Amino acid sequence: MMAVERVGVAVIDRFHHPYLDSLVLPQTRIYVDMDGVIVEPYPAVIRELRANGWPDFTIEDWTSWDIVDVLGGRSLDVAMAILATERIYEDATLVPGSIEAFAAFRANPRILPVVLTAPLWANATAKVEWLLRHDFLLKEIVLAADKNLVACDAGDYLIDDNPAHFKSWPGMGLLYDRPWNQNYECDGVRTLRVFNWEEVCDAFL
Ligand SMILES: [Mg+2]
C-alpha cells in the first residue's frame, strides 16, 4: 500500500497536473437541476397559461409531470409553446437559498457544484442569461438534452424536482419537494426528499 502511495506522489510531483491533484483530493460533485430548484419560473409560466387559455390555473393545479393531464387534455403543442417562451425567464426569481448554497459549495474545496439542466431549446439562451444575471458561473453550467449523458459516478449527487432523472443516475438523488412530485416515494437510500436549501446545506457543509 505504501509503495502505491509513493508511486502516486512521485507521478504527481513530476507532472503537477490539476487533474492529478483532483485525484488526490476527490470532490463531491453536486449536480443541481435549474427549474423549480434554482429558479422559480412557475409564476411566469402560470401568467402565460392564464393569458393563453387557462384563466383559472394555479400552481396547486400542477400535480404531475404530465402537462397534457395537468392542463385538462388541451393541446400539448400549445402548452409547450407557452412553456418555451423566453418571457418565462425575464422576471423569474431565485428559489430561496439556492445562490447562497452555490456560494457556500464553491468555497468548499471538497465540493463541486454544477447546474445541470435539460432545457427546452427555444429558451435555452434565456436560461443561461438568467443564471449569469444571478451570479452563477458559466463554467458551472451544463445543458444536456438528457441528464444521463453526463459522465458521473456513484459518488455524485443530483438535486432535482423531477424524479424521472433518478432512474439511471448512478449516485444519490435528492428530490426537491414541489407540488408536482408529491406522488413519488423516496426509498431513503438512493433517493431522499429534501424540503429547502437550508436542509441541503446542512447535509453537505
Ligand atoms: Mg426541474
Image (cartoon, rainbow, N blue to C red):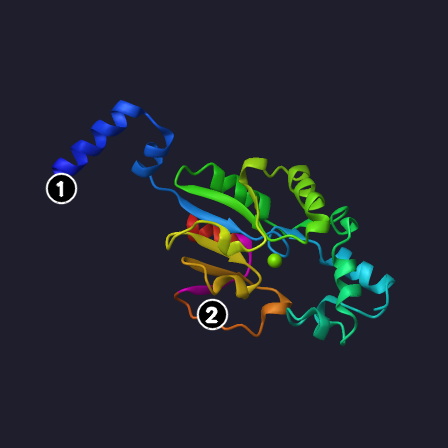
Give the labeled residue for mark 1. Answer: 1
**Residue at 73% across / 50% down in the picture?**
122
Give the labeled residue for mark 2. Answer: 186
Helix or strand or loop: what does disc 1 sit on? loop
Q: Is residue 188 above or below residue 96?
A: below
**Residue at 45% across / 65% down in the picture?**
191
x, y (%) of residue 114?
A: 51, 45
Q: Is residue 103 above or below residue 65?
A: above
x, y (%) of residue 36?
A: 63, 57
The range drawn in magenta is 190-197
Question: Within 10 angstroms of label 2, few (less than 14), some, or many (20 or more) residues?
Answer: some
Question: Within 10 angstroms of label 1, few (less than 14), some, or many (20 or more) residues?
Answer: few
What whole-number distance in Å separates the C-alpha atoms at marks 1 and 2? 39 Å
x, y (%) of residue 37?
A: 60, 54
x, y (%) of residue 156?
A: 42, 52
Say if disc 1 is inside 8 Å of ligand 1.
no
Q: Is residue 139 above or below residue 182?
A: above
